[in-house]
Image (cartoon, rainbow, N blue to C red):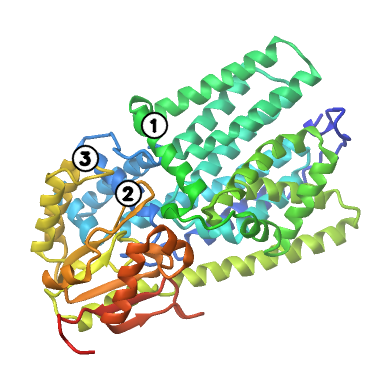
Amino acid sequence: MSIETAHIATGPSERFPERRPPWTAAALLACVALALGLRLAANGFGLPDTFEPDEPKLVNHALAFGTGDLNPHYFVYPALQMYLLFFCYGLLYVVLRAAGSVESLEGFKLLFLSDPTVFYRVGRGLTALSGAASVFLLFLLGRRLYGQAAVGLLAAAALALHPVDVRHGHYVTADVPMTTLLLLALVFLAPTLERPSPAAGFRAGAAAGLATAVKYSGLAFLAPLAAAHALAARRAPGPAVRRSLLVALAGLALAFALASPFSVLEWRKTLDGMRFILDVKRDGQFGIARGSSWGTYFQLAFLAGPLALLSLAGLLNALVRRTPADLLLLAFLVPYLLAVGGSQSHSPRYLVPAFPLLLLLAARWLVGLRLGARGRATVAAAALLFALGQSLGVVRDLLRPDTRQLARRWIEGHVPAGESIALEWGGDDTVRLAETAESIEAKIRRHEQGGTTGHSREQIVAALRLKQKAQGNRPAYRLVQIGENRGNRLEGDGQDLDALRRTGVGYLVTSSAALGDPRSAAFRRAYPDIAGFYDRLEREAELVRRFDPEAGASRGPTITLWRLRAQGEGG
């Protein structure tokens, strides 16, 4: 009997015929292969520059484990994904050493510092594999919950082609791997609706613990875990349900502790990391409230195309029918969507864990629709073809040059090497330029005096001493950082036009990705002094070049290069 047939008083039950067409395995394989292909396409976009802020955080910390210190010294994310990347980089070193591409461990480090392309390709490949695995797991979950392979297969095809999942399947970030492990946890949890057992509970809890060791949002699994056991208790109350729940919770805690041990050993820093995340969600980035995310997420999840419209229909259908399988999925979706929707900080990637379950509800609704086989096939094909077009558009967009790349190339071709250039904090948000030995030594002195976060002091200093060797023949500049972000609060470090001139800074680069809009009312209320610095910059500096994203040609933030006039120099 499928789980869907279990009767509860809160809604009707139903039985789908348990059919598995002979072509199911081939169709599933095609879905997984298509998912992998779309996520590996444009795998090297942007490189050797990187523009997604979380990518360098994860890659750099993974490589830092090579010093022998397995403490990440960074707790905004748990460490499991970093450890997986470290393992992959160990294999990469063995392969490159065997091929003669590097001759020593120091050569391996220099390769990363001179051209990190292969390292990011490997990390992105790991995310792509995870995204393809999610497609397979969603098929298993749909078949197990609803008793019909067609439901799982349609949901799997939709996830393979979903444009937001395809885009974020290209990044070395935590959202897709966490989602994969959450789907695995739900696959293990599904039998609990009919027959709770400690073994099933432990498997589900352990998978959820691994998801939480990738990103703390994995704790959202506690809601469906509680719902599954509550539904099982209504069907057959007894000690087996309590044992299963307790073992599941123990499995979650154990897996998390084993997969990210320093998150437990340094639990105060873990709580600090969680508090930082909550601050961003509550107050917006840099403490600038930008409004709730309801409208943005509703449009993206439910209005952005045929799959989105089907997801809305599937969600509403589940809220009306409330069968046990529906309630299990809703137990995750409803609190999760309420939580992210109420956040002051929003990004499409926050919806990545919700999309597979929304697509599963859409598939379940469509398969049960009384349109006839041909009618259902027509609707499904139209929605999937539209999603394919969107995903191919994502790949094309990733292949376009980024404004930060265009600005870097222009600066290297027009600004003399050795010139002093001020850049805003956040290297991923602005132009990546090579540094002079003087600039690197200044950084080393700062870190030796204790100005290090995220890595150990020794790791930072060792990397900086190798950096100069790795820069090759690129034009190098004396770089000066202005501004800083401390605990989700911007600080105006070095944002003094007169002081920059006195220290010989000739140029300043601004990026719309670093701050948002300093001219906005919200920014001026939160940071009047910093806003004043940018007002004065526009009045007194010379605009040299502006790089705006152009539809169909380039993407990225607006990058502006200013020349700072000397005191008394005319306009």
Determine the CA span between mark 2 and mark 3. 17 Å
Relative depth, front residue between 340 and 398? 340
Relative depth, front residue between 142 and 350? 350
Which of the two discs, 1 and 3, sits closer to the camera? Answer: 3
Q: Position of residue 382 (x, y in %)?
A: 75, 66
Q: Residue at x 44, y 37 (%)?
A: 274
Give the answer, above or below, for where 378 lies relative to 560: above
Task: Judge whether residue 363 can be spotted in this image.
Answer: no
**What is the number of the mark on residue 486?**
2
Quadrant position of the C terminus in the picture: bottom left
Q: Which residue is mark 1?
A: 260
**SS of the residue under disc 1:** loop
Q: In the rendered structure, which disc, 1 or 2, sits on the residue that comes first in sequence?
A: 1
Q: In the displayed image of the protein, which residue is found farthest to the bottom?
A: 570
Q: Which residue is mark 3?
A: 456
Q: Position of residue 253 (x, y in %)?
A: 48, 24
Q: In the displayed image of the protein, which residue is found farthest to the top?
A: 239
Give the answer, above or below, for where 168 lies relative to 387: above
Determine the CA span between mark 1 and mark 2. 25 Å
Q: Residue at x 48, y 42 (%)?
A: 278
Which amino acid is tagged 3?
Answer: Ser
**What is the number of the mark on residue 545?**
none
Answer with left or right where residue 515 lies relative to residue 238. Answer: left
Q: Are marks 1 and 2 in contact (CB under 8 Å)?
A: no
